[in-house]
Amino acid sequence: MGRDVVSAKLDIIFKKIFTENRDMLHSFVAGMLDIPPESISEINITNPELPPETVSGKFSRLDLSMRVDNRIVNVEIQVKNDPDYRDRTLFYWAKLYSSELKSGEDYSELKQTITINIINFNMFGGSDYHTEVAAMIKGTDEVFSDKFCIHFFELKKVGKKPNPIDNRELWLQFINADSEEEFEMISSTNVPIMQKAVKVIYDMSEDTKIREVARLREKALHDEASALKNAKAEGIEEGMEKGRAEGRAEGRAEGMARGMEKGKAEERARMIEQLRKMGVGSDVIDKLS
């Protein structure tokens, strides 16, 4: 039986790994952006803290924001497929992009802003685990602005067999791994930085404090998912009850209308019968009816 290991899919584990191991962060960012590691001169994490209330609180974000040379880069792990996830991602990108411009600065000072979304569900068609969203001019291949860039990496489409020359896929396989067997497959590639990453995971898995923090975070995420599910169910039930009430009201209105129409028809029939008794001809009665 293999050892019980923590998973880097859990956002708090992911953030702790990469804030405390800068060489691993350097390799990871280069892989996700598909650029040579030597092209990155400096990475500064702008939100390295892990506040306790964020760890155990529902509806809290545990993302990793950084400045990579002259770019703003944000990485987020998303386990559940929220209906508004695309809109939330776009909104968060816009906040990052605009927040960097200081009062009085020229718009040309705005930096390229990149969000990296590692998601544990399928969002797009096709078998490719990577989707890049860019600002393009419709009908052409011309880029409107290279300052807009959103990456999605779908973990469920990532293969299991490690390729020692594919840095990006190795990191995604590392994040996706849930068992000692999977981590051992990654370590067997003999890629030094990946062997270090596996050792870091093993050490964290033996740390009782980290395991407790991971447990609290998993509980918070589970509670959040349950709260959203219950809210959705309550919303559906409330909508159904409102529909039933509106239906009953509509039924009463229709009944009243039918009654009024029936009353008018009966009154008209009595009037016609009275005219016949008075000897009024059929041609006149036909015109009245």
Image (cartoon, rainbow, N blue to C red):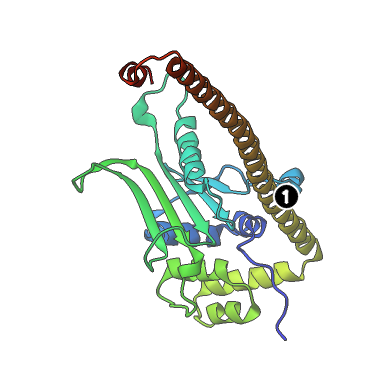
The x and y percentages for residue 214 are 73, 60
Q: Amino acid at mark 1?
A: Val
Residue sitting farthest toward the bottom: 1
Q: Is residue 141 left or right of residue 98?
A: left
Q: Tell me which corner region of the image, top left, top right, bottom left or bottom right, holds residue 31.
A: bottom left
The x and y percentages for residue 38 are 40, 59
Mark 1 Cα shell of 10 Å, populated few (<14), some (14-19), many (≥20)? many
* Relative depth, front residue between 105 and 250: 250
The x and y percentages for residue 260 are 55, 23
Q: Quadrant of the C terminus?
A: top left
| Above/below status of 162 relative to 60 | below
Q: Tell me which corner region of the image, top left, top right, bottom left or bottom right, holds residue 110.
A: top left
Q: Residue at x 61, y 59 (%)?
A: 14
The x and y percentages for residue 128 are 38, 66
| Above/below status of 211 relative to 89 | below
Q: Quadrant of the N terminus?
A: bottom right
SS label for mark 1: helix
| Whether residue 21 can be seen here | yes
* Relative depth, front residue between 268 and 275: 275
Residue sitting farthest toward the left: 140
| Whether residue 59 can be seen here | no
Q: Tell me which corner region of the image, top left, top right, bottom left or bottom right, holds residue 168.
A: bottom left
Label 1 sits on residue: 55
Q: Residue at x 48, y 38 (%)?
A: 91
* Relative depth, front residue between 219 and 95: 219
| Above/below status of 34 relative to 192 | above
Disc count in the image? 1
Q: Residue at x 57, y 75 (%)?
A: 195
Q: Residue at x 56, y 50 (%)?
A: 82
